[in-house]
Image: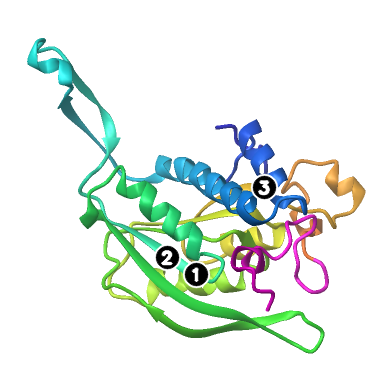
Protein backbone atom coordinates (compact mmCIF):
# COMPACT_ATOMS: atom_id res chain seq x y z
CA UNK A 1 0.00 0.00 0.00
CA UNK A 2 1.10 3.57 -0.65
CA UNK A 3 2.12 5.73 2.29
CA UNK A 4 1.76 9.49 2.65
CA UNK A 5 5.01 11.42 2.73
CA UNK A 6 4.97 13.56 5.85
CA UNK A 7 7.01 14.90 8.76
CA UNK A 8 5.02 13.47 11.66
CA UNK A 9 7.68 10.88 12.49
CA UNK A 10 8.55 7.32 11.55
CA UNK A 11 5.81 5.75 13.67
CA UNK A 12 2.98 7.43 11.72
CA UNK A 13 1.67 5.60 8.63
CA UNK A 14 -1.08 7.15 6.48
CA UNK A 15 -2.43 5.01 3.62
CA UNK A 16 -2.63 6.66 0.19
CA UNK A 17 -3.60 3.84 -2.19
CA UNK A 18 -6.63 4.62 -4.39
CA UNK A 19 -8.76 1.88 -2.84
CA UNK A 20 -8.31 3.25 0.70
CA UNK A 21 -8.90 6.85 -0.37
CA UNK A 22 -12.04 6.03 -2.33
CA UNK A 23 -13.48 3.82 0.41
CA UNK A 24 -12.99 6.53 3.02
CA UNK A 25 -14.35 9.24 0.71
CA UNK A 26 -17.56 7.25 0.29
CA UNK A 27 -17.71 6.49 4.02
CA UNK A 28 -17.38 10.23 4.80
CA UNK A 29 -20.20 11.22 2.45
CA UNK A 30 -23.72 11.92 3.77
CA UNK A 31 -24.96 9.80 0.86
CA UNK A 32 -23.61 6.65 2.57
CA UNK A 33 -25.90 5.43 5.33
CA UNK A 34 -27.42 2.29 6.75
CA UNK A 35 -26.21 -0.98 5.25
CA UNK A 36 -23.77 0.57 2.75
CA UNK A 37 -22.21 2.61 5.56
CA UNK A 38 -21.57 -0.54 7.61
CA UNK A 39 -20.18 -2.42 4.62
CA UNK A 40 -17.78 0.44 3.90
CA UNK A 41 -16.78 0.52 7.57
CA UNK A 42 -16.08 -3.21 7.46
CA UNK A 43 -14.03 -2.87 4.27
CA UNK A 44 -12.04 0.07 5.61
CA UNK A 45 -10.98 -1.68 8.80
CA UNK A 46 -10.10 -4.87 6.95
CA UNK A 47 -7.79 -2.72 4.83
CA UNK A 48 -6.17 -1.11 7.87
CA UNK A 49 -5.66 -4.52 9.48
CA UNK A 50 -3.72 -5.69 6.42
CA UNK A 51 -1.37 -2.74 6.98
CA UNK A 52 -1.19 -3.48 10.70
CA UNK A 53 -0.01 -7.05 10.09
CA UNK A 54 3.25 -5.58 8.75
CA UNK A 55 4.01 -4.80 12.41
CA UNK A 56 3.16 -8.22 13.87
CA UNK A 57 5.86 -10.78 14.77
CA UNK A 58 6.83 -13.14 11.95
CA UNK A 59 8.60 -16.48 11.77
CA UNK A 60 10.09 -18.55 8.94
CA UNK A 61 8.91 -22.15 8.68
CA UNK A 62 8.18 -24.85 6.09
CA UNK A 63 4.66 -25.85 5.08
CA UNK A 64 3.94 -28.69 2.61
CA UNK A 65 1.15 -27.97 0.11
CA UNK A 66 -1.39 -30.49 -1.18
CA UNK A 67 1.03 -31.27 -4.00
CA UNK A 68 3.57 -32.72 -1.54
CA UNK A 69 1.85 -36.12 -1.73
CA UNK A 70 3.09 -36.53 -5.30
CA UNK A 71 6.06 -34.11 -5.33
CA UNK A 72 8.36 -33.86 -2.27
CA UNK A 73 9.58 -30.42 -3.34
CA UNK A 74 6.08 -28.93 -2.96
CA UNK A 75 6.96 -27.13 0.24
CA UNK A 76 6.51 -23.45 1.06
CA UNK A 77 9.39 -21.91 2.99
CA UNK A 78 8.80 -18.25 3.74
CA UNK A 79 8.18 -15.75 6.51
CA UNK A 80 4.69 -15.98 8.01
CA UNK A 81 2.87 -14.51 10.98
CA UNK A 82 4.24 -16.19 14.11
CA UNK A 83 1.51 -18.56 15.39
CA UNK A 84 2.96 -18.38 18.91
CA UNK A 85 2.48 -14.64 19.30
CA UNK A 86 -0.02 -12.96 21.60
CA UNK A 87 -2.32 -10.25 20.24
CA UNK A 88 -4.65 -8.19 22.40
CA UNK A 89 -7.37 -6.26 20.56
CA UNK A 90 -8.80 -3.41 22.60
CA UNK A 91 -12.40 -2.32 22.10
CA UNK A 92 -12.77 1.31 23.16
CA UNK A 93 -16.55 1.53 23.39
CA UNK A 94 -18.56 2.63 21.63
CA UNK A 95 -16.85 3.57 18.37
CA UNK A 96 -14.35 0.72 18.62
CA UNK A 97 -16.82 -2.11 19.21
CA UNK A 98 -17.41 -3.10 15.58
CA UNK A 99 -13.81 -2.43 14.40
CA UNK A 100 -12.41 -4.59 17.22
CA UNK A 101 -14.78 -7.43 16.29
CA UNK A 102 -13.71 -7.13 12.63
CA UNK A 103 -10.07 -7.38 13.71
CA UNK A 104 -10.82 -10.39 15.91
CA UNK A 105 -12.56 -12.32 13.13
CA UNK A 106 -9.92 -11.49 10.53
CA UNK A 107 -6.97 -12.41 12.75
CA UNK A 108 -8.65 -15.68 13.75
CA UNK A 109 -8.38 -16.66 10.08
CA UNK A 110 -4.58 -16.36 10.32
CA UNK A 111 -3.62 -17.14 13.92
CA UNK A 112 -4.62 -19.82 16.48
CA UNK A 113 -7.55 -19.11 18.79
CA UNK A 114 -5.22 -18.93 21.80
CA UNK A 115 -3.25 -16.09 20.19
CA UNK A 116 -6.15 -13.60 20.16
CA UNK A 117 -7.73 -11.81 23.12
CA UNK A 118 -10.26 -8.98 23.15
CA UNK A 119 -10.42 -6.45 26.01
CA UNK A 120 -13.18 -3.85 26.50
CA UNK A 121 -12.61 -0.32 27.75
CA UNK A 122 -15.53 2.02 28.50
CA UNK A 123 -14.85 5.75 28.49
CA UNK A 124 -16.35 9.00 27.27
CA UNK A 125 -15.36 12.60 26.77
CA UNK A 126 -15.89 15.19 29.50
CA UNK A 127 -16.80 18.59 28.04
CA UNK A 128 -17.21 22.08 29.48
CA UNK A 129 -20.22 24.36 28.96
CA UNK A 130 -18.94 25.35 25.51
CA UNK A 131 -18.62 21.76 24.32
CA UNK A 132 -14.79 21.69 24.44
CA UNK A 133 -13.24 18.42 25.62
CA UNK A 134 -11.65 18.79 29.06
CA UNK A 135 -10.96 15.18 30.01
CA UNK A 136 -11.97 11.52 29.88
CA UNK A 137 -14.30 9.57 32.17
CA UNK A 138 -13.80 5.83 32.58
CA UNK A 139 -17.02 3.98 33.37
CA UNK A 140 -15.60 0.44 33.60
CA UNK A 141 -13.64 -2.19 31.70
CA UNK A 142 -13.12 -5.88 31.06
CA UNK A 143 -9.41 -6.71 30.80
CA UNK A 144 -8.43 -10.34 30.29
CA UNK A 145 -5.20 -10.50 32.27
CA UNK A 146 -1.52 -9.84 31.72
CA UNK A 147 -0.25 -7.89 28.71
CA UNK A 148 3.30 -9.24 28.96
CA UNK A 149 4.94 -9.62 25.53
CA UNK A 150 1.71 -8.97 23.63
CA UNK A 151 1.07 -6.79 20.62
CA UNK A 152 -1.75 -4.48 21.68
CA UNK A 153 -3.92 -3.26 18.77
CA UNK A 154 -6.48 -0.51 19.38
CA UNK A 155 -8.87 0.13 16.44
CA UNK A 156 -11.01 3.27 16.74
CA UNK A 157 -12.61 5.12 13.80
CA UNK A 158 -11.96 8.79 14.61
CA UNK A 159 -8.88 10.21 16.32
CA UNK A 160 -9.66 13.81 17.27
CA UNK A 161 -7.97 15.23 20.37
CA UNK A 162 -6.13 12.11 21.51
CA UNK A 163 -7.29 12.46 25.12
CA UNK A 164 -9.13 9.12 25.24
CA UNK A 165 -6.48 7.23 23.30
CA UNK A 166 -3.67 8.64 25.46
CA UNK A 167 -5.51 7.28 28.51
CA UNK A 168 -5.88 3.82 26.93
CA UNK A 169 -2.24 3.72 25.81
CA UNK A 170 -1.05 4.74 29.26
CA UNK A 171 -3.22 2.03 30.81
CA UNK A 172 -1.70 -0.73 28.66
CA UNK A 173 1.84 0.63 28.68
CA UNK A 174 2.26 1.19 32.41
CA UNK A 175 -0.69 0.29 34.63
CA UNK A 176 -1.48 -3.36 33.91
CA UNK A 177 0.34 -6.58 34.74
CA UNK A 178 3.28 -6.98 32.35
CA UNK A 179 4.74 -4.92 29.52
CA UNK A 180 3.44 -5.17 25.94
CA UNK A 181 5.91 -5.77 23.13
CA UNK A 182 4.20 -3.21 20.89
CA UNK A 183 1.20 -0.89 20.83
CA UNK A 184 -0.54 -0.19 17.51
CA UNK A 185 -3.46 2.23 17.08
CA UNK A 186 -5.60 2.01 13.92
CA UNK A 187 -7.92 4.77 12.71
CA UNK A 188 -9.87 5.92 9.69
CA UNK A 189 -9.09 9.61 10.27
CA UNK A 190 -6.54 11.38 12.48
CA UNK A 191 -5.86 15.06 13.11
CA UNK A 192 -2.50 16.84 13.50
CA UNK A 193 -3.53 17.57 17.09
CA UNK A 194 -4.06 13.87 17.74
CA UNK A 195 -0.74 12.92 16.18
CA UNK A 196 1.04 15.49 18.36
CA UNK A 197 -0.64 14.14 21.50
CA UNK A 198 0.15 10.48 20.84
CA UNK A 199 3.68 10.88 19.47
CA UNK A 200 4.64 12.94 22.53
CA UNK A 201 3.62 10.18 24.96
CA UNK A 202 6.54 8.54 26.82
CA UNK A 203 5.83 5.26 25.00
CA UNK A 204 6.46 4.09 21.45
CA UNK A 205 3.15 3.85 19.61
CA UNK A 206 2.66 2.86 15.96
CA UNK A 207 -0.13 4.90 14.33
CA UNK A 208 -1.99 3.67 11.23
CA UNK A 209 -4.69 5.71 9.51
CA UNK A 210 -6.41 6.17 6.16
CA UNK A 211 -6.40 9.98 6.24
CA UNK A 212 -5.01 12.94 8.15
CA UNK A 213 -7.49 15.84 8.26
CA UNK A 214 -6.08 19.35 8.73
CA UNK A 215 -8.86 21.27 7.00
CA UNK A 216 -8.83 24.30 9.30
CA UNK A 217 -5.16 25.08 8.66
CA UNK A 218 -4.21 28.31 6.88
CA UNK A 219 -4.11 28.02 3.06
CA UNK A 220 -0.33 28.41 2.93
CA UNK A 221 0.08 25.55 5.42
CA UNK A 222 -2.14 23.31 3.29
CA UNK A 223 0.25 23.87 0.40
CA UNK A 224 3.12 22.28 2.37
CA UNK A 225 3.96 18.68 3.23
CA UNK A 226 1.89 17.39 6.15
CA UNK A 227 3.82 17.92 9.35
CA UNK A 228 6.17 20.53 7.90
CA UNK A 229 4.38 23.26 9.88
CA UNK A 230 2.86 20.92 12.45
CA UNK A 231 2.28 23.61 15.09
CA UNK A 232 0.21 25.62 12.58
CA UNK A 233 -1.86 22.68 11.38
CA UNK A 234 -5.40 22.46 12.65
CA UNK A 235 -8.01 19.76 12.11
CA UNK A 236 -10.36 20.44 15.03
CA UNK A 237 -13.07 23.07 15.33
CA UNK A 238 -13.93 24.84 18.59
CA UNK A 239 -16.04 21.85 19.69
CA UNK A 240 -13.23 19.37 18.88
CA UNK A 241 -14.96 17.93 15.82
CA UNK A 242 -12.77 16.91 12.87
CA UNK A 243 -12.76 18.99 9.65
CA UNK A 244 -13.40 17.82 6.97
CA UNK A 245 -14.06 14.69 9.03
CA UNK A 246 -16.89 12.21 8.50
CA UNK A 247 -19.44 13.17 11.15
CA UNK A 248 -19.92 11.36 14.44
CA UNK A 249 -19.12 7.78 13.43
CA UNK A 250 -19.91 6.44 16.90
CA UNK A 251 -23.43 7.83 16.50
CA UNK A 252 -23.74 6.56 12.93
CA UNK A 253 -22.47 3.07 13.76
CA UNK A 254 -25.08 2.67 16.50
CA UNK A 255 -27.80 4.89 15.00
CA UNK A 256 -27.97 6.57 18.41
CA UNK A 257 -27.26 10.29 18.37
CA UNK A 258 -26.45 10.91 22.01
Q: Calculate the distance from the C-alpha at mark 2 to the C-alpha at mark 3.
A: 21 Å
Answer few, some or many: residues within 10 Å of disc 3's Cα (few below 14, many 20 plus, some between 14 and 19).
many
Q: Residue at x 64, y 68 (%)?
A: 255
Q: Residue at x 68, y 49 (%)?
A: 27
Is 68 on the left or on the right of 102, as rendered? Answer: left
Residue 92 is situated, as x and y percent measured from the top left of the image, at 49, 69
- 112 vs 51: above or below: below
The residue that mark 2 highlights is: 90
Task: Check if residue 93 falls in the magenta segment.
Answer: no
Main SS of the magenta segment?
A: loop
The residue that mark 1 highlights is: 92
Residue 159 is situated, as x and y percent measured from the top left of the image, at 63, 62
Quadrant housing residue 65 = top left
SS category of the residue bearing label 3: strand
- 254 vs 28: above or below: below
Is 216 on the left or on the right of 87, as rendered? Answer: right
Ranked by sequence position, the earlier of labels 2 and 3 is 2
Front residue (pair 31, 195): 31
| Quadrant occupied by the N terminus | top right
The residue that mark 3 highlights is: 211
Q: Calculate the distance from the C-alpha at mark 2 to the C-alpha at mark 1.
A: 6 Å
Ranked by sequence position, the earlier of labels 1 and 3 is 1
Answer few, some or many: residues within 10 Å of disc 2's Cα (few below 14, many 20 plus, some between 14 and 19).
many
Amino acid sequence: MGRLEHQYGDNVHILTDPWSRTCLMRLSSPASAGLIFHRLLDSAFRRILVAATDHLPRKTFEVPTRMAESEPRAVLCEEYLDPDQKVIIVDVARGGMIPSHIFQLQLLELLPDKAIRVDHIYMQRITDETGRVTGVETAGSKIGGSVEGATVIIPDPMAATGASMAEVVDLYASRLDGTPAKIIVCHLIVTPEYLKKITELPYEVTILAMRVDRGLSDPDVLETMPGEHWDRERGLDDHDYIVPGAGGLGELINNAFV
